[in-house]
Amino acid sequence: MRFPPLLWKTTNSVGFWIGVFFLVHFVGCWHPPLEAAHSWRQATGLMVARNYFEGHTTFFYPKVDETNGGSGIIGMEFPLLYYLHGKLSLLFGFHAGTGRLLNSAISTLGLAYFYALLLRFLSRKAAMYATLLLGVSCYFMYSRKVMPDTAALAIYLMGIFYFFEALRFGKWRDGMLSFSLLSLGLLLKISVLPLVAFGVFAYFHYRNKPKKAFVLLLPLLSLIPAFVWYFVWNPHLASRFGNWYNLGGGIDHGAQVFLQHPAELIMHVLFHPFFSYLAIALCVFGMFMACRKEIDLGLKVSIPVFVGLFVAYALKSGEIFLTHEYYILPAVPILAILAGNTLAGLKKGAWFLMVLISVEAMANQAHDSIYLL
């Protein structure tokens, strides 16, 4: 049976599926944060947002209700989303749904920018598959929570898009947008740091091509605000107000944890990016096929840089990395590109495989989607 032309044209559009991604997140968005994964983490964020809403603190002093006899002021990720949530609540009333929709809107926009970014380097078909794979990955589950992880990733991807715009055309507007978005992405969640390897890719990929060289400094400059927030301001809040601030553990301790729990580590790395073994199988097949071809120098250098930074981040996180799916998020766009490019290279059955992966991924995330029941 053939699809009607209009239906086929619509469902074959990445914009249609990005729209579906956003609309699905509206379902039950006003329910309390009762999902299986990280309800406690959302509750913490809601505490901060509500304290902004009630005027109990100012922007640079995020406050929780778990005071331990103190003020509740705590060092944490850059609280912009919680602050916006609190201030929007002055107009609409305070509710978890406001934070969810804010995160979902930013995460959805990130998918659109991801697709636009990939069109620079991949075919339209590969870019579409990669975007769909990112959309059904663990990115789907966490883009609806009152947590900054997918929003941080989305904003960082926007910054990368404008980086390549600035690198090509040298417009100050694009350069400033890139710096601002890259900085904000890192501020919202420093876990996106391994993706700074894109700057290394750009340097080697465009080594013999026209470019605006000053733009190559932007990924490095964008590290400065995050460094000040996480390693200067947050420790200051912790020492002044007495609340614990998590800077992670030692890399050697993380290595010991991973060696003690190899099965959990393998399961985490292979399953949790997409909640789909089929998707990971595509990634492995794609890596095998890529190794048989001549690889761009930019990829040869930047991929090891990314892997090194990601491994260091994982080791620094230790046991938390093993028990929190969203810690794998920085690697998901890279894996989605690999799997999407593999799907695009198939002569037959690509859409069928994409549907199977989507069904598998959504079914394995259903435990966290009680709002859909």
Image (cartoon, grey):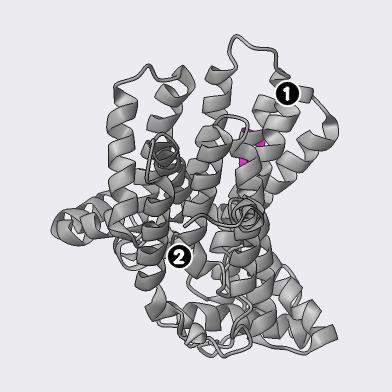
- Tell me where residue 329 appears, x and y as whole percent: 45, 55
Residue at x 66% of width, y 55% of height? 6
Residue at x 84% of width, y 36% of height? 173
Label 1: few (<14), some (14–19) or many (≥20) C-alpha neighbours in 10 Å: some
Q: Nearer the viewer, mark 1 or mark 2?
A: 1
Give amino acid for label 1.
Answer: Arg
Q: What's drawn in magenta, residue-wise? A: 220-224
Q: Could you say which quadrant of the image residue 341 lies in?
A: top left
- Is 275 placed above or below 344 here? below
Label 2: few (<14), some (14–19) or many (≥20) C-alpha neighbours in 10 Å: few
Mark 1 residue element: helix
- Tell me where residue 238 appears, x and y as whole percent: 55, 69
Q: Is residue 121 left or right of residue 340?
A: right
Which of 210/7 is in front?
7
Q: Is residue 218 left or right of residue 55?
A: left
Residue at x 67% of width, y 43% of height? 159
Give amino acid for label 2.
Answer: Asn
- Tell me where residue 245 appears, x and y as whole percent: 49, 67
Q: Which residue is mark 2?
A: 246
Sequence-first tag of 1 and 2: 1
Can the viewer see residue 188 in this picture? no
Question: What kind of secondary structure does the magenta stretch mostly adopt?
Answer: helix
Report if residue 223 lies within the magenta region: yes
Q: Are marks 1 and 2 in contact (CB under 8 Å)?
A: no
- Tell me where residue 350 appears, x and y as whole percent: 41, 45
Q: Which residue is mark 1?
A: 168
Q: Is residue 342 left or right of residue 4?
A: left
Residue at x 55% of width, y 87% of height? 67
Which of 275/96 is in front?
275
